[in-house]
Image: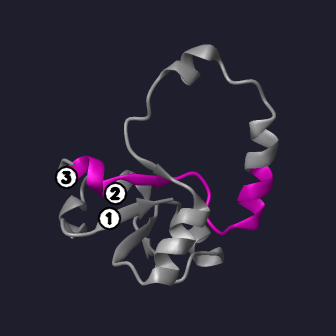
Amino acid sequence: MNFLKKLIILVTCLLVPAWNLALAQEAQKPVPPSVLEKEPEVPRITPKQVMDLLYKGEDIMIVDVRSFAEYNARRIIGARSIPVNEIEARIKEFPRDKDIIFY
């Protein structure tokens, strides 16, 4: 798997109850067919899969891409705050030897 694909594993929501409610409401909206036909550009992982990795003690990096204010208000223990607009500039901070989960 090339570095960027291994680097970017997206989590649509992770351990934040308010997000779960928002996503449930969003899921009720119809999805345009053009979106359904496309393959995801990066691997995706569910919150349960992330929890399983954490419980197993897997060596993963979790990155919170929200603003610092949102990160300070509520976050996953152990997650690093790197706002989405800083990811490219801080690419050297990401390890090449482990999976990285962005949320």
Q: Secondary structure at mark 3?
A: helix
Image coords of residue 102 (percent x, y): 44, 59
Q: Which mark is residue 3?
A: 3
Which residues, given as a range, are shown in magenta? 3-22
| Disc 1 to disc 3, C-alpha distance | 10 Å
Q: Is residue 56 above or below residue 30?
A: below
Question: What kind of residue is marked 3?
Answer: Phe
Q: Secondary structure at mark 1?
A: strand
Q: Which mark is residue 99?
A: 1
Q: Which mark is residue 86?
A: 2
Question: What kind of residue is marked 2?
Answer: Glu
Image coords of residue 6 (percent x, y): 28, 54
Q: Is residue 59 magenta?
A: no
Q: Residue at x 49, y 78 (%)?
A: 54
Q: Residue at x 46, y 81 (%)?
A: 56
Q: Disc 2 vs disc 1: which is toward the camera?
A: 1
| First reached walking from the N terminus: tag 1 or tag 3 | 3
Q: Residue at x 52, y 19 (%)?
A: 37
Q: Residue at x 80, y 54 (%)?
A: 21
